[in-house]
Image (cartoon, helix red, strand yellow):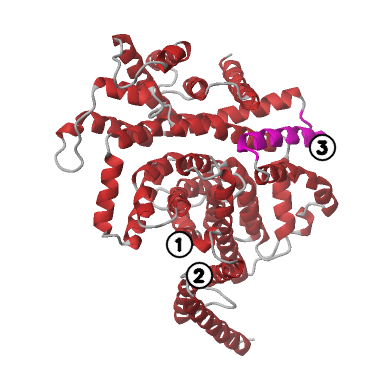
């Protein structure tokens, strides 16, 4: 019975957003309130309050209390929308019961986030609330005049500056639609086609299964928007294939973790956080995709090179011919790529992401009728909507809780204070500020999903980078990259540990190997911070082409140095020279590019001579 209720609520949740997105006739505030109401109800029904006492009487009573604390405040907001809209926030006093409802709202949200994602984000939000209440007692620059009860209630609940802020608005407007879109792709068998296509493209080359993992994870990860979900989905197929091909289990798990993590960096979708970035920056979605494409290709090229060098080193073969998908079937099934093509074309033509996503969902339903196995009738469509809505739950509560942090940070003036302190520490030294931002983002990202960690850093630290004359898009993409790579950064590398579970490998060893495989992801953000040509901003076509070519060559030399293999096994000197060549090519400038090419060519010449000598 409970499962049926969950599926019914999830279906209503998805239909609610599809209908309101298509009709466009619901006030944004009511949309956010309805979005959060559905999401929190599903969390309390789907996630037990405690794994050990999930079925205890106390556990059921607490869950019931949290459902009441969800329905009453949100129901009040929805039913009294006009009255609250015409009220003067921060000035007009609230009734006692309104304060109580606000407290219930915050408590239920923190508990739903704990159930969905663990304690990390609720602790951060709790610390922010304590800071708001006790800030007047903190000496020095971090202190503030304190928040009144009215200010706290209005900030967090009765305005759009806290829980119902921009992040939740993005989740309600864009993110849930693209998650449902990904669910439709999977239900229609398009995800399987991605895997077959990747297999066909890489099958005959050395280490084909690992290269297949890289390509399929890039394709699927861009849509799914979650590194861990991507590992769990594609890793079940790619990791056993890599192990069977001869890769060590730690390497197989690390490849899948790194490739899945890069999915959120790869257009055309880039997961949930990119929509938040649109609202933060005011930059159109299409422009962000254009700026992100070259860095994403550099990242995946690096992983691809790493996999190739390892395959050559171990003399691994490609995929056996018996396991290859038939070319005729691939050609015949090429129509399954139409939904992604439709999204790209619609965005390029200037249509909104919402409209493009809705059209792509319709196109999936239409093309599914070309495959009897995955043909989508009413039942399959409902299943896809239900699965997508359930997948959006954690994003919704995450964005709402992150709104608590952002609201308090902005209202207390902490963001401006933090910017001033960062500038003072860095003494307007861009590199130092970038390093501090990267470290802070990774530490946050180890405990938080990509979206909230990006939101917090975008509020606190990105303004400092912008003040050092870095373009807004470059500063935000910098934070976005490090919020992602936290998934593969030891000691808390969640994507690597998920992959290690599938590969039955040692988690920490897998984590450190994933860090080495993904090393370019830690360097690329610094590259485009110093050289915005990588984001395709400004400059001539010739200069942009030169930047792209030298960057790819630099990444090639860097992966060769990291992997210890180029034409043959590299010596310590050759690895050092390759690293120097990579840095010179990556750093912007004609003379450094020439130096990098000379150093790289020198190593190739040395390796060629040694290879001839031993063959």
Residue 438, can we see it?
A: yes
The disc, 1 or 2, on the residue closer to the chain's N-terminal end is 1
Marker count (numbered) = 3
Q: Is residue 389 left or right of residue 396?
A: right
Question: Which range of residues does the magenta coloring cover?
Answer: 351-376
Q: Which residue is found at the position 61% from the left and 66% from the top?
A: 541
**Residue at the spot of label 1:** 523
Report the residue marked by disc 3. 371
Distance, label 3 to label 2, CA atoms, is: 44 Å
Q: In terms of secondary structure, what is the magenta stretch mainly? A: helix
**Dot 2 corresponds to which residue?**
558
Q: Are marks 1 and 2 in contact (CB under 8 Å)?
A: yes
Q: Assess whether mark 3 and mark 1 are in contact (beta carbons under 8 angstroms).
A: no
| Depth check, front residue: 202 or 601 | 601
Which SS class for mark 1? helix
Who's the residue at 45% across and 23% down the image?
48
* Image vertical order of residue 135 relative to residue 58, above or below: below
The C terminus - image quarter: bottom right
When the figure is inspected, residue 4 is found, relative to residue 231, above or below; the finding is above
């Amino acid at each position: 019975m409970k499962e049926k209720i969950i599926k019914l609520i999830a279906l209503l949740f998805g239909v609610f957003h599809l209908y309101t997105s298509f009709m466009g006739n619901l006030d944004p505030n009511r949309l956010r309130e309805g979005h959060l109401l559905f999401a929190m109800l599903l969390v309390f029904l789907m996630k037990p309050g405690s794994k050990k006492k999930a079925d205890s009487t106390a556990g059921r009573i607490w869950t019931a209390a949290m459902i009441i604390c969800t329905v009453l405040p949100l129901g009040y907001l929805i039913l009294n929308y006009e009255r609250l809209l015409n009220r003067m926030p921060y000035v007009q006093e609230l009734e006692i019961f309104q304060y109580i409802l606000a407290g219930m709202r915050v408590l239920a949200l923190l508990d739903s986030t704990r159930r969905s994602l663990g304690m990390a984000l609720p602790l951060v939000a709790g610390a922010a609330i304590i800071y708001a209440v006790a800030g007047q007692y903190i000496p020095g620059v971090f202190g503030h005049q304190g928040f009144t009860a009215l200010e706290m209630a209005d900030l967090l609940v009765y305005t759009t500056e806290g829980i119902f802020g921009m992040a939740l608005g993005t989740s309600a407007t864009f993110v849930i639609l693209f998650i449902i879109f990904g669910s439709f792709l999977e239900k229609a068998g398009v995800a399987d086609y991605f895997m077959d296509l990747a297999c066909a493209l890489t099958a005959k080359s050395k280490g084909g299964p690992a290269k297949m993992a890289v390509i399929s994870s890039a394709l699927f990860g861009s849509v799914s928007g979650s590194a861990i979900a991507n590992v769990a989905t594609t890793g079940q197929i790619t990791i056993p294939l890599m192990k069977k091909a001869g890769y060590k289990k730690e390497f197989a798990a690390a490849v899948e973790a790194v490739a899945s993590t890069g999915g959120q960096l790869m257009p055309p979708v880039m997961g949930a956080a990119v929509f938040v970035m649109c609202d933060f920056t005011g930059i159109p979605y299409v422009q962000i995709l254009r700026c992100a494409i070259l860095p994403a290709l550099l990242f995946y090229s690096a992983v691809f090179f790493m996999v190739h060098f390892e395959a050559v080193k171990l003399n691994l073969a490609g995929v056996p011919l018996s396991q290859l998908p038939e070319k005729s079937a691939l050609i015949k099934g090429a129509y399954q790529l139409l939904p992604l093509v439709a999204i790209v074309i619609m965005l390029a033509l200037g249509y909104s992401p919402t409209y493009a996503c809705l059209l792509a969902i319709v196109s999936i339903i239409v093309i599914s009728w070309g495959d009897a196995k995955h043909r989508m009738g009413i039942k399959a469509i409902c299943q896809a909507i239900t699965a997508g809505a359930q997948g959006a739950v954690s994003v919704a509560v995450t964005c709402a809780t992150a709104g608590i942090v952002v609201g308090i940070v902005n209202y207390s003036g902490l963001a401006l204070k933090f910017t001033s302190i960062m500038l003072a520490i860095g003494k307007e030294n861009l590199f130092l500020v970038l390093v501090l931002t990267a470290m802070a983002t990774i530490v946050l990202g180890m405990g938080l999903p990509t979206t909230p960690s990006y939101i917090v850093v975008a509020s606190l630290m990105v303004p400092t980078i912008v003040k050092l004359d870095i373009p807004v898009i470059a500063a935000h993409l910098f934070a976005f990259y490090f919020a992602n790579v936290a998934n593969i950064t030891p000691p808390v590398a969640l994507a690597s540990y998920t992959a290690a579970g599938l590969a039955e490998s040692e988690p920490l060893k897998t984590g450190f190997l994933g860090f080495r495989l993904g090393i370019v992801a830690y360097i690329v953000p610094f590259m485009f911070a110093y050289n915005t040509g990588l984001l395709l901003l400004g400059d001539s076509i010739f200069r942009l082409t030169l930047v792209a070519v030298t960057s790819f060559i630099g990444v090639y030399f860097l992966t060769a140095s990291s992997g210890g293999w180029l034409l043959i096994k590299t010596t310590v000197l050759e690895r050092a020279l390759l690293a120097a060549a990579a840095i010179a090519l990556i750093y912007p400038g004609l003379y450094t590019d020439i130096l990098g090419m000379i150093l790289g060519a020198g190593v190739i010449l040395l390796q060629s001579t040694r290879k001839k000598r031993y063959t």
